Amino acid sequence: MKDDSELVEQIRSGSPDDFAEIVRRHQSRLFAILSRYERDAHKVEDLAQETFLKAWRALDQYDARRAPFEHWLSRIAAHVAFDHLRRERRSNDEITMSDLGESALEWLHSENTESRPEAADAREILHLAMRQLSPEETMVITLQEIEGRSAKEISRLTGWSGVAVRVRAHRARGKLRAALIRLEKGRP
Amino acid sequence: MNEGRMQKLFEAVRGERAVQPAEDFAGRVMSAIHRESRRAPAVTVFDQLTRLFPRLAWAAALVIGLGLATELYFSLTGSTNLATDVAEVAEQWRFAAN
């Protein structure tokens, strides 16, 4: 089986349909990444398609000596996700406490500090709290806390300096905690 | 909301099942690529300038270099230089206008 860089070479030398194999190889990982930024399945698919189209257009710029293909693709996905966050912030869709499901509200107001929320409830709560964060802050929290990436990896993916990543992560955590405290008290 | 509770939220989200690609997702991407390839690409002036960039930059540098070399040559040989010529032309034009 050919590796990614060999496939890319083949595509560049006039075999465009081989790009379908690249898509098949990386689609699941890409969907997993983009699902962190968007809950709607159709929108996740649109974002994944946008990522692959951008990769296709920039394929001539890919240099296998500098990074594995999946790192290069992840960087494109991170930029697509960031643009998506910015577009979402510009839209006027207001999310309020009433959008939270009953079980999510129950966990928020529960006295039991040891209980773990259901994944969907946690997602709803974080999504609502992150509305208070800038796209940069949402991005850094998602990459660091949810995807479990290091500051160095975040820097590589976003193009931000290491210092900028650490400062944004620190500020974002503070703002997120404040937003979650407001939610606990019943004020979004 | 203490640190532990916030961590529980993150952990729970980490365990959430991601959206799965549709079976024909790769086919859809390829259709989009073929559609795009059929469309004529819009070429802007900036695109053309970008394409010509290294050559234009060298040509501009060459013209500037030639100008400077000419000026230096005339200055060193004691003949009239560009600055004096320009000043003379300006003077003549000013008096002619008056």
Image (cartoon, rainbow, N blue to C red):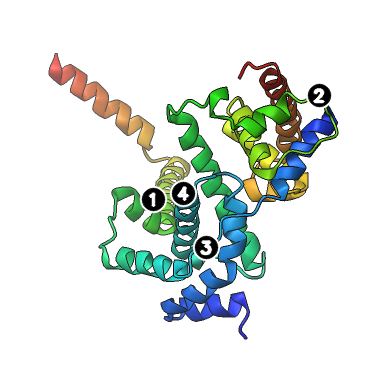
Q: Which residue is mark 4?
A: A43
**Does A144 sit left or right of A37 as displayed?**
right
Would you call the spot at circle 3 few (<14 residues within 10 Å), some (14-19), or many (20 or more)? Answer: many
SS for callout 2: loop
Callouts 3 and 1 close, C-beta under 8 Å: no
- Name the foreground residue: A158 vs A140: A140
Would you call the spot at circle 4 few (<14 residues within 10 Å), some (14-19), or many (20 or more)? Answer: some
Q: Which residue is mark 3?
A: B21
Q: Which residue is mark 2?
A: A111
Real-space CA distance between mark 3 and mark 1, rounded to the nearest whole angstrom: 57 Å
Real-space CA distance between mark 3 and mark 2, rounded to the nearest whole angstrom: 39 Å
Callouts 4 and 2 close, C-beta under 8 Å: no
What's the mark number on residue B63? 1
Name the residue furthest left: B97
Q: Are marks 3 and 1 on the same chain?
A: yes
Would you call the spot at circle 2 few (<14 residues within 10 Å), some (14-19), or many (20 or more)? Answer: few
In the rendered structure, the residue with mark 2 lies on which chain? A
**Does A183 sit left or right of B85 as displayed?**
right
Name the residue furthest top: B98
Real-space CA distance between mark 4 and mark 2, rounded to the nearest whole angstrom: 36 Å
**Nearer the observer, disc 3 or disc 2?**
2
Amino acid beneath label 3: Pro
In the rendered structure, the residue with mark 1 lies on which chain? B
The structure residue drawn at horizontal position 62% and vertical position 86%, both measured from the top left corner, is A1
Residue A59 visible here = yes
Residue B11 location, x and y as percent? 77, 44
Amino acid beneath label 4: Lys
Callouts 4 and 3 close, C-beta under 8 Å: no
Q: Are marks 3 and 2 on the same chain?
A: no
Residue B96 location, x and y as percent? 14, 20
